[in-house]
Image: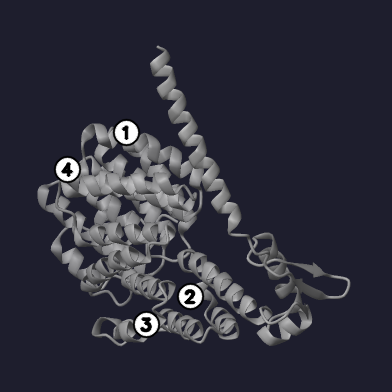
Amino acid sequence: MSAMQSSYLPATTESIAMAQEAKDASESILILYRVLEDPSSSSDAVRTKEVAITNLTNYLTKENRAQELRNLLTQLRPFFALIPKAKTAKIVRGIIDAVSKIPGTSDLQISLCKEMVEWTRAEKRTFLRQRVEARLAALLLESQEYTEALTLLSGLIKEVRRLDDKLLLVDIDLLESKLHFSLRNLPKAKASLTAARTAANAIYVPPAQQGTIDLQSGILHAEEKDYKTAYSYFFEAFEGFNALDDPKAIFCLKYMLLCKIMVNQADDVAGVISSKAGLKYVGPDVDAMKAVADAYSKRSLKYFETALGDYKAQLEEDPIVHRHLSSLYDTLLEQNLCRLIEAYSRVEIAHVAEMIELPIEHVEKKLSQMILDKKFAGTLDQGAGCLIIFEDAKTEAIFPATLETISNVGKVVESLYMRSAKIMA
């Protein structure tokens, strides 16, 4: 739909005021479109049109008219020739940001960014193209189009390094780190994050971007099981985002609580939640971590599974939390099974399942995995439905001592041989 009207309104402050006083948003939108139709290119008219574009973008966003926002970018191309490139970049990025606020527009955002990349390339607007390409790479990452995102970033990062645009370089290096982490390539993810930190140290980094760097650092340290360091990074990120009232703060708090649980300090979770900053974010995400902490404190798999079921969106659908909780669940299950079976030499699997309050199939699968991983010596008699536990074969102390003696004799013989070789020479 083309909302442009054939009869334009003059680009004046009166026309802008008329749009603001309209009885509904649809009428305001039509008035603003007519203002943009004004053929005048005087400095006052251009300034008024810039205000009209900002207001129109806000109205279209509130009305969830994503396609019209896309069409607006195309319709404004002749106007962009009249204004400085920096203002064009600001308007284009503002409209792309506006589309991102409308739910369910991921595919539209990707096609819009691709369209704008082609236009900026044709118009030789390098500064804007690089920023739109960075935005496109972030959207491709969210859509799990990893190959396309990596290809785009590889070319972009070389170009930006050559231009030495530090602020954009920080963004791109961070994106590359997230992309490699999603592809489970931890060494490259760490290398990209180090590059982002190096670039960030040379310039002033906005607090939101610094928070993103700290958040990514915490995620990578947690992946390496260094939960104490990860906690300190998540705390730094949380403080930064909390001061900005950024919604990412809740994720940082959630990951802080996860680190407490993973280092066996589940009892500290309640203290973190009840702090002044923690109380601000009380809700399903915090409740989910509290339920997990309670289950871990009680060493109860039943409570753990109940928490996973009750808070599926907060725990299982968050890839960071899900990965670490899977590891925690396995550890907890193994500890419980070892504690239950240590009193037996032969026990029915059904009885073990009944004691641990889990399905027989689940317990049987886990026991077979533990046997293969040599967590205990035993075998499964599936015909009888029993687990047979073997006694640990005790290693005689004389064998390691004998090996050590032979090794020492070997060293002595080698030393004597070297001396005799020197004498003979």
Q: In this view, does 408 lie to the left or right of 239?
A: right
Q: What amino acid is at disc 3?
A: Val
Q: How crowded is mark 1: few (under 14 residues within 10 Å), some or many (20 or more)?
A: few
Disc 4 target residue: 84
- Which of labels 1 and 3 is toward the front? 3
Q: What amino acid is at disc 2?
A: Gln
Q: Quadrant of residue 168?
A: top left
Q: In the structure shown, which secondary structural element does the residue marked by tag 3 occupy? A: helix
Disc 2 target residue: 314
Q: Residues within 10 Å of mark 2 (few under 14, many from 20)?
A: many
- Residue 64 image point, x, y percent: 41, 67
Q: In this view, does 131 lie to the left or right of 86?
A: right
Residue positioned 51% across, 64% down in the render: 323
| First-in-chain label (1 vs 4) | 4
Q: Do the residues labelled 1 and 4 touch (CB within 8 Å)?
A: no
Q: In the structure shown, which secondary structural element does the residue marked by tag 1 occupy? A: helix
Task: Give 2 or 127, whichever is nearer the viewer.
Answer: 127
| First-in-chain label (2 vs 1) | 1
Disc 1 target residue: 158
- Residue 398 image point, x, y percent: 59, 56
Asked if residue 293 can be seen in this view, the reply is yes
| First-in-chain label (2 vs 4) | 4
Disc 3 target residue: 269
- Which of labels 2 and 4 is toward the front? 2
Residue positioned 51% across, 74% down in the render: 313
Q: In this view, does 338 lie above or below 368?
A: below
**Distance between the alpha carbons at the discs numbered 1 and 4:** 27 Å
| First-in-chain label (1 vs 3) | 1
- Which of labels 3 and 2 is toward the front? 3
